[in-house]
Amino acid sequence: MGADKTLKTGVGGQGLGVGIRPPGSPGRGPGIKVEAVVVEERPSAVYQVVLPTQQKVLAHLVGVVKRNFVRLVPGDRVEVELSPHDPTRGRIMRKL
């Protein structure tokens, strides 16, 4: 009579939610947010930015910035979140 409305499950009867982490699992640690200036655009939406300490960092755009089609050119000020694992990499959180 009615359609079978069972949920597809993965290992252990858990749902197949992509990108969902259980509480307490290790994930991205808290990054350090700093202001920076875009110096150069590189392939694959990667930018070289300079921090106030004159350190050069490679940073990529976060999803919300990409979705809103924000364009960056050399000289733009941006907010960068540095990786806790590799201080020479980061994510561009927003344009200032």
Image (cartoon, rainbow, N blue to C red):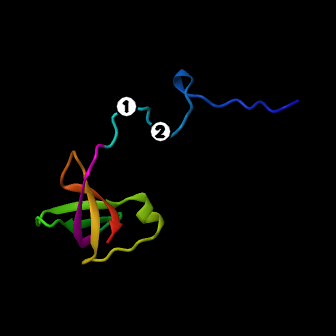
Residue lying at the far top of the rendered structure: 12
The residue identified by callout 1 is: 24
Quote the CA–CA distance across marks 2 and 1: 12 Å
Q: Nearer the viewer, mark 2 or mark 1?
A: 1
Quarter-of-image position of residue 33? bottom left
Rendered-image quadrant of the N terminus = top right
Residue reaching furthest to the right:
1
Q: Is residue 9 magenta?
A: no
Is 34 colored magenta in this rendering?
A: yes
Residue occupying image coordinates x 18% and y 52%:
87
Q: Position of residue 49 (x, y in %)?
A: 22, 67
Q: Residue at x 20, y 61 (%)?
A: 57
Q: Answer with left or right where residue 94 lies relative to residue 67.
A: left
Return the residue at label 2.
20
In this rendering, position of residue 25 left or right of residue 6: left
Q: Residue at x 22, y 47 (%)?
A: 84
SS of the residue under disc 2: loop
Tell me, for residue 39, which label it has, or none: none
Q: Position of residue 23 (x, y in %)?
A: 41, 32
Q: Amino acid at mark 1?
A: Gly
Q: Nearer the viewer, residue 14 or 44?
A: 14
- Say which quadrant the C terminus sits in: bottom left
Q: Give the residue type that dot 2 points to.
A: Ile
**Left or right for 52, reference 61:** left
Residues shaded magenta: 29-41
